[in-house]
């Protein structure tokens, strides 16, 4: 039986690549985005159904899932990929920006999972793949709201992995490193225009931003993240986490294989915090 997967955030980048990869491997794909343009469906007319979906709008989620189930006969997996970020100083981050990030990254994911679960449970064995981030493991400066949202995703996913085992639904976490191809810093900085940096933070902000730009690790390749998502969707073991990227491997090593003092020293060095302390 051909399996069917729903993927959020397919208008560009990682979501679009993931939709193509699954279709190319013979899966049926419900490729969702705010405004479908037909491009993916035209590439794989038999395999891909594009559907409008806004993660903050439960009605649109329900409609997209129903359209996919009507077209393909069921739902075997969901990839929660849609997400937004922002580079900012927490104190100056507007309330609406904070809420937008949580509405997309956390509450939107919850909306998709809850709407999809009856269909996944009906398959007698299904998978939810949540795309988190390396900052879900280890926090970094200037991304406090994004970090908080991704650490919420980590906790939600681990808890659900236990709970949903009783329903024969597996939960997987993808923890990618920084992907320059997705223009993460550029996108985050564009969003930050709504959050001017207070004068008292300006020297630190400039220093931390330069440390972010001069990242000491190679960029994580989007294709390796796509392959991890595909592996997770096909993995029927109890494995929860899929770390992708040298930076996240180091974050994970520091977080889980060293003392608290060693972890903080390592993260302070990686984020430029130690250099700032010396400079200050």
Image (cartoon, rainbow, N blue to C red):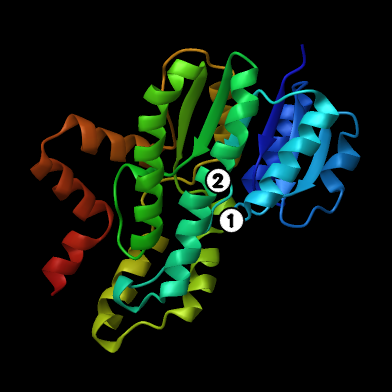
Tag 1's secondary structure?
Answer: loop
Q: Mark 1 points at which residue?
A: 56
Left or right side of 67 for 267: left
Left or right side of 122 for 240: left
Instruction: Pinpoint residue 277: horizontal percent, then vertical percent.
Output: 13, 67
Around disc 1, counting alpha carbons within 10 Å, would you say few (fewer than 14), some (14 to 19), or many (20 or more)? Answer: many
Q: In this view, does 235 lie above or below 71?
A: above
Tag 2's secondary structure?
Answer: helix
Left or right side of 265 for 111: right
Q: Residue drawn 34% across and 39% down?
A: 155
Image quadrant in which the N terminus is located:
top right
Instruction: Pinpoint residue 175: horizontal percent, then vertical percent.
Output: 43, 38
Q: Residue drawn 34% across and 54% down?
A: 148
Picture quarter containing residue 146?
bottom left
Q: Can residue 210 be seen in this view?
A: yes
Instruction: Pinpoint residue 261: horizontal percent, then vertical percent.
Output: 9, 44
Q: In this view, does 278 lie above or below 234?
A: below
């Amino acid at each position: 039986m051909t399996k069917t997967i729903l993927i959020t955030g397919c208008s560009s980048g990682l979501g679009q690549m993931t939709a193509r990869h699954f279709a190319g491997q013979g899966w049926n794909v419900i490729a969702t985005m705010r405004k479908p343009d037909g491009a993916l469906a035209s590439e794989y007319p038999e395999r891909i159904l594009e559907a409008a979906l806004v993660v903050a709008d439960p009605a649109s989620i329900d409609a997209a899932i129903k359209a996919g189930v009507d077209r393909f006969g069921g739902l075997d997996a969901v990839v929660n990929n849609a997400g937004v970020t922002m580079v900012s100083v927490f104190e100056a981050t507007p309330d609406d920006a904070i809420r937008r990030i949580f509405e997309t990254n956390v509450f939107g994911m919850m909306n998709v999972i809850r709407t999809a679960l009856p269909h996944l449970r009906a398959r007698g064995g299904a998978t939810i793949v949540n795309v988190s981030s390396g900052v879900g493991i280890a926090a970094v400066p200037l991304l406090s709201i994004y970090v908080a949202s991704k650490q919420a995703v980590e906790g939600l996913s681990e808890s659900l992995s236990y709970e949903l085992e009783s329903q024969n639904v597996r939960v997987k976490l993808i923890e990618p490193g920084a992907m320059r191809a997705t223009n993460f810093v550029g996108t985050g900085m564009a969003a930050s225009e709504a959050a001017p940096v207070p004068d008292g933070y300006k020297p630190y902000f400039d220093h931390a931003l330069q440390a972010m730009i001069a990242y000491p690790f190679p960029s994580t390749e989007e294709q390796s993240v796509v392959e991890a998502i595909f592996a997770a969707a096909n993995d029927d073991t109890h494995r929860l986490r899929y770390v992708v990227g040298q930076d996240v491997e180091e974050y994970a090593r520091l977080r889980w294989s060293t003392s608290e003092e060693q972890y903080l020293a390592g993260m302070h060095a990686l984020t430029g915090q130690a250099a700032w302390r010396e400079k200050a």
